[in-house]
Amino acid sequence: MKVLRQLLILATLLHVSVVWSQEFNVSPNLPQAATQVAKKIAQKLKSHQPNVGHMGIAVLAFGDEKRKITAQMGNLSTVMQGEIIKSLKEAIKKEELDKFDVLRYSQIENVFKGTSPLGLTDKDPSAAREVLEEIDGVDIAVVGHFKFNGSDTSVLPKKLTISSTIVLPNTTEKVTHQVFTSDIKDLMGDGTDPDEFQLENRIVAEIYALPKGYPLLSSVENYTKLPLKLCKDHSSKFFGKLVLVIDKDKYEGRPYFIKLINTGEPFHPASAEANNEPYTIPDKNRLFSVSAYVDGVSVFYNKVITAGVVTYEKDIRHPAYVSRPILTGKGQRYSSNGSNPRLGEGTIVSTSGTDGSTWTVRGFIRANLTDPPSSTADLFLFGTAEDSIGAEFSTGNRSQIGLISLFTYTERLSSDQTFGAVAEPEAGTEPGPTIPFPLVKTSIQNYHQEIYEVLQIFYRYSDSDSLPMDPDDLVPFEPN
């Protein structure tokens, strides 16, 4: 039996370089903003380094100006958290502040298991310090907020202020920075206009779930496609968003998968073909990659090697840095037999059989491409918000719970022209049984660095109070 191997990018985008010598008054995107915030935090910590022992630093997710993380904020909060963790580790190493240890995301989760971080915000530093005193393993907390109303993201300033507070045992330090909002809007997702009733995404998604009555490890042929709906209720926080309503009696605790599809149209706006200019590679054969998140966590675990020991941890970094699948054009597939300047390894060949224009994501993936390769995936299971992979703290209330986010990046062809680019939900995704998940590794050599398009799907059980009261406000949806 031939096993289909799916194509994976492990070499992530060179979206942003860490530039320590350069100061930005306003950062162009979130990763550079996090780098500058981390650099300023490291400078503040210089005068607080202990004489003996080590101090653990936990970076928490940032809320809006009311210190809330709303559904409308999409992946913004945890992506910022992940980027500051990464950048602060680098900044502390560069400044040789060896008495400070920045906790990884998985370590923060372990610290807060069974402990509520309620009150650990920058709204009341004195109260935050009292909370911090009760938490073992954390001596310093980095908390903060974005200066906007997370419940109304329709109008944002051109430049967004990020306020950070370093909560130390005996004092606090403040750091502020600004970022242009274009990257922020991508992370929150723009939605679509229900009156236009169109979503012209090149990359679309379908959701399939296994009904009760089948074994958990059943073949994908037994899965049922679940209908996506578009919310047209102006008073709903899901207005203009895609919504997946799950029959709780039929699907709670059951596995599901996400099928990514390269539709081949419309033309990329930079395409020479679309502008009636000469080209060598048709736009329909352009390569795409998709950074996929479920409940705020990348569908690819991050491979971490510490003292020779390999572990796989949840990855909440910016979409530019996480591993992601490659989708070819229709009628094409990847082959390891050959080479192509468009790819780091292997080539693209024509096929009349199964092609590479679709990619099935069955769970949270451990990409292990050693010889022999042994990649696996923990199946996606429809579960509860409390047990979600993205729950992080016992208090929950995370905007990303019950949210599937897809961020698409595109290959830059040689002929391309220039273009620019609140209440806790009750449904969540739990990691389920582990299955084999064959993969091959390569990279796309030339990218447009901007996020090309965003697709978000909010999923809720059918008895959820957060859904529109009138069922007619959720209309059946199929992409063009």
Image (cartoon, grey):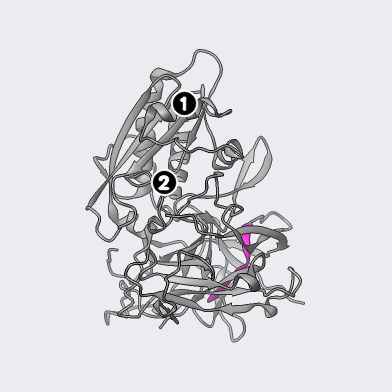
Residue 125 vertical position relative to residue 364 in the rendered view, above or below: above
Residue 9 locus on image (x, y percent): 54, 60
Side of 475 where 396 appears, left or right? right
Q: Residues within 10 Å of mark 1 (few under 14, many from 20)?
A: few
Q: Quadrant of residue 183?
A: bottom left
The first of marks 2 and 1 along the sequence is: 2
Q: Residue at x 27, y 40 (%)?
A: 24
* Residue 77 in the image, given as x and y percentages of width and height: 42, 49
The foreground one among 91 and 395 is 395
Task: Please tell me which residue lies in front, 246 or 403.
Answer: 246
Q: Position of residue 112 (x, y in %)?
A: 57, 38
| Circle 2 Cα neighbour tier, 10 Å, few/some/many (<14 / 14–19 / ≥20) | many
Instruction: Confirm whether the magenta stretch covers residue 163.
Output: no
Secondary structure category for the residue under label 2 = helix
Residue 342 in view (yes/no): no
Q: Is residue 137 above or below residue 209?
A: above
In the rendered image, residue 341, in percent from the top left (x then y), is placed at 48, 66
Please state the extent of the stretch shown in magenta in the rendering: 357-365
- Element assignment for label 1: helix
Would residue 362 be counted in the magenta stretch? Answer: yes
Calculate the distance from the C-alpha at mark 2 to the C-alpha at mark 1: 25 Å
Please name the residue that numbered disc 1 is placed on: 130
Q: Residue furthest left?
A: 158
Which amino acid type is marked by label 2? Met
Residue situated furthest top in the rendering: 51
Main SS, magenta residues: strand
Q: Is residue 179 left or right of residue 16?
A: left
Q: Quadrant of residue 19?
A: top left
> Pointer 2: what residue?
80
> How many numbered marks are there?
2
